[in-house]
Amino acid sequence: MKLFGLTGGVGMGKSTAAGFFLQLGFQMIDTDDLARELVEPGQPALAEIQNVFGPAFLTVSGTLNRAGLARLVFSEPEARKKLEAILHPRIRERWQAQAGVWRHQNCPLAMVVIPLLFETGAEADLDKIICAACSPAVQHDRLRGRGWTTEEIQGRLASQLPADQKIARSHFVVWTEGSLASHRRQVEEIAKKLK
């Protein structure tokens, strides 16, 4: 089995690229989905987050106060490191377990979407890395379209490697500024090379 990584900065088109690879027959797991599963009520990671950050980061119904925690960790690097220490090892364990299942099933092509791929040292476990990318101006426009403030955007970007470094360390790049048809064509071309 070949295992590939798909990365890119926030708002750069990873999810769209992932959808196209999925349509082309790649098995797919997204670490953002794993992170959400890990903080559901009853999960050990949620209890650990409550112990480290306090009960203010849980809602009255016992779910994670995502907005409050995001504000904290993207404005205070030490808080972000604490959260990453709770989540990143668990996320890696889960996607590696899924890769093991795919290997056992003899799946030919599989992909893991990892926004912080290089930041977490995941490249050693992957055959090739694809980066979804766009210009900083387009990225900012997309994030403002999500309702993010300039401070929120700067906080998120500060937590990730700059896009040019991700591009330089990747084997393939999908430039996501054009039409969806252009985006898909690039993915199709990369998929041919990966197969």
Image: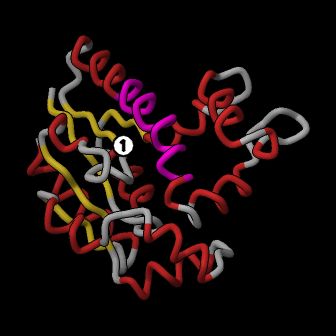
Query: Percent x, y for residue 135?
Result: 34, 83
Give the quarter of the figure containing the N terminus: top left
* Depicted 163 relative to depicted 83: above or below: below
Give the quarter of the figure containing the C terminus: top left
Could you tell me which residue is drawn at 58 percent across and 57 percent down? Answer: 73
- Stretch of the chain drawn in magenta: 79-95
For the residue pair 55 and 154, the one nearer the viewer reads as 55
Could you tell me which residue is drawn at 83 percent across and 32 percent down? Answer: 62
Could you tell me which residue is drawn at 33 percent across and 33 percent down? Answer: 27
What type is the residue that disc 1 sits on?
Leu
Query: Percent x, y for residue 96?
Result: 31, 25
Residue 182 visible in this rendered orientation of the protein: no
Q: Which residue is mark 1?
A: 22
Left or right: residue 75 versus residue 156 is right
Q: Secondary structure at mark 1?
A: helix
Q: Which residue is at the far top?
A: 104
